[in-house]
Image (spheres, rainbow, N blue to C red):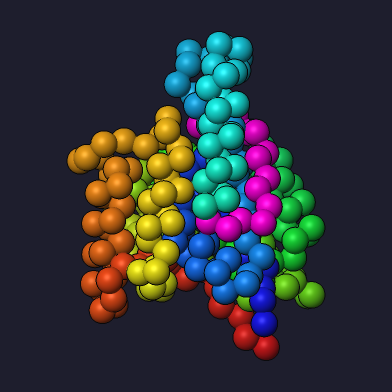
Amino acid sequence: MSQTVLVVAAHPDDEVLGCGGTMRRHADAGDRVVCLILGEGITSRHDSRSGGLQSGATDLEKLHSDSHRAMERLGVARLELAGLPDNRFDSMDLLDVVKVVEKVFDEEKPSIVYAHHAGDVNIDHLVTHRAVLAACRQLPGTPLRELYFYEVPSSTEWQTPALACPFVPNHFVNIAATLDAKVAAMEEYKSESRGWPHPRSPQALRALAQWRGATIGTDAAEAFVVGRIVKY
């Protein structure tokens, strides 16, 4: 039976880096995959957000177009771009971020949710994690049955154990059949992709997938930390 899957990401490209192969696998299985990207992206690279919105408007539009093309590669049925201030989520009330997640959660009623792991150096990733926890509380009638947290290469691995719980995966998804789709989706993000030996390079994405795959005896995998599994 098909399910609705919600992926929540802080920035355009986080969703691909964290669980792109798993998203494609869900889509191939007939599941409805919905992606909510909270942050606008790019504007933090300017001196101010207002300056970034003005001088970088064309780049921002292109990034969002890249997002739509990347989601097409992964078979995503709905992409929601919330446009929150890039790398400035900590300047907002957490409740306001929670309400953005809650809106899509209530509309789609997913049974599976994927989101950022808390042990991450990027503040937007941490706020996203906390917002998803609040929005996905297991209240009576909540459709959610599985909650997983993903890693983001070039961000999660830079956090130190002294500041946050390290990413220690205990759930793995075989993406041997969908790794190429993940890499192709990431390549749609022209402004975010990097060359080797950067962690967001195609070679590094394949190497990480192969290592995670070797952990479970398959050619490629994505790794997650289990947040919650509910069985009634």
The correct choice, above or below, for 57 with respect to 177 in the image is: above
On-image quarter of the N terminus: bottom right
**Residue 21 drawn at (x, y percent):** 44, 61
State the residue at coordinates (23%, 72%): 214
Would you identify the image quadrant in which residue 94 lies?
top right
The correct choice, above or below, for 185 with respect to 150 in the image is: above
Residue 21 shows in the view: yes
State the residue at coordinates (43%, 56%): 181
In-image side of 123 versus 92 (left or right): left
Would you identify the image quadrant in which residue 76 lies?
bottom right
On-image quarter of the C terminus: bottom right
Name, please, the residue furthest toward the left. Answer: 197
Total labels: the figure holds: 0
Residue 85: say if magenta.
yes
Name, please, the residue furthest toward the bottom. Answer: 232
Residue 98 shows in the view: no
The correct choice, above or below, for 145 with respect to 189 in the image is: below
Would you identify the image quadrant in which residue 54 lies?
top right
In-image side of 94 versus 20 (left or right): right
Residue 124: say if magenta.
no
**Residue 51 drawn at (x, y percent):** 56, 11
Magenta residues (range): 74-87
**Residue 205 drawn at (x, y percent):** 31, 52
**Residue 145 drawn at (x, y percent):** 63, 76
State the residue at coordinates (59%, 34%): 64
Between 79 and 11, the one nearer to me in the picture? 79
State the residue at coordinates (38%, 61%): 179
In-image side of 181 versus 139 (left or right): left
